[in-house]
Amino acid sequence: MKTNTCARLILASTVAVLATNALAEGELNLYSSRHYDTDERLYSDFTDMTGITINRIEGKADELIARMQAEGANSPADILLTVDTSRLERAKDAGVLQSIDSDVLEARIPASLQDADNQWFGFSQRARIIFYDKTDVTNPPMDYVSLADPAYQGQVCHRSSSNVYSQTLLSAVIENHGAEAAKNWAQGVVDNFARAPQGGDTDQLRGLVSGECDISISNTYYFARAIRKDVDGLDPEAMDNIGWIFPAQNAEGAHMNLSGGGVASHAPNKDNAIKFMEYLASDQAQQYFSAGNDEYPAVPGVGLSASVAALGLFRPDAVDLSAVAKNLPAAQQIFNEVGWE
């Protein structure tokens, strides 16, 4: 009993110290599940410009959200940064974000890339597109719907249903085509699998190189990264044999995955947090998302890096991602019903 009492006192003392430090002027406490070394430039430039020191806690999105919930009102977190609309919406539903007012964010971030209640905003995007082996596929699918065409039986590779990219894509199909059509689509894609869902996006591209797949789905920044630098299993010769399609250019447009963030519900440094969010929407930061991590800027009109521009111009799906996020439970149910592992 005495040991437990001491442990509780130490924990309470630690939380108090964290909370006190978090209130220090000129600091910002960032919880981030973005795992890219190139983001260091974003942080250092912000500090150089503002004098605000960034204290970082990094981890997986669900772990950080759970941590913020457990910390409650004593949480030192000012901002949560994460990848994919599903996780941003999960954070909102968990009550760890708050609505904010920012004329800068409203003016620069398109309405479709922000939460309807201003609890999260998107800062960079990745198009989820179709890649194919140019040797074996002479008539590639031109849209997501065609991935379910029996003509492509045994050719398609995709990630598992537990992956957030898969979940958000199906959620967008539901939003654009309705639940019944989305279920038929998901069943058709399962019927066309070349192998059981496995690996990450780079593994889907490697599947084309190895010959396991003729068609795969991946976010653009994985391919653009291999254009910019060496990636194991994706040498220049192999890359030359991979073609790509920006899907649904005569329909809804290419599906976009979002990376974004929001201000923590109990942010002790709220003003600094909003300053950082506004900085991420600046031309400087937006250009670095593209140059440093091969992503598409969220702010219209910002120039693309050479590796991203090499993929070409396309029309993105302008569907409201906040609405897409609401379809996530329905998407998971469909995955379960059609046996998408």
Image: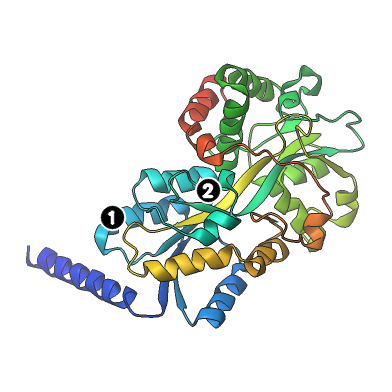
Kindly identify which numbered label has been placed on residue 294. none
Q: Position of residue 144 (x, y in %)?
A: 72, 30
Left or right of 245? Residue 339 is left
Q: Where is residue 255 in the image (x, y as percent from the top left)?
A: 67, 39
Residue found 53% across the figure and 54% down from its top: 106
Farthest left residue in view: 1
Q: Is residue 151 above or below residue 244?
A: above
Left or right of 222? Residue 151 is right
Residue found 80% across the figure and 59% down from its top: 307
- The answer to which of 133 and 147 lies nearer the viewer is 147
Type of amino acid at the residue the image marks with label 1: Ala
Left or right of 234? Residue 111 is left
Residue 318 visible to an observer of this rendering: yes
Pointer 1 local density, CA inside 10 Å: few below 14, some 14–19, many at least 20: few
Pointer 2 local density, CA inside 10 Å: few below 14, some 14–19, many at least 20: many
Kindly identify which numbered label has been placed on residue 114. 2
- The answer to which of 78 and 217 lies nearer the viewer is 78
For mark 1, what is the residue? 70
Residue found 80% across the figure and 29% down from its top: 141
The mark nearer the N terminus, 2 or 1, is 1
Q: Is residue 234 above or below residue 16?
A: above
Residue found 76% across the figure and 35% down from its top: 247
Circle 2 sits in a helix, a strand or a loop, which is it? loop
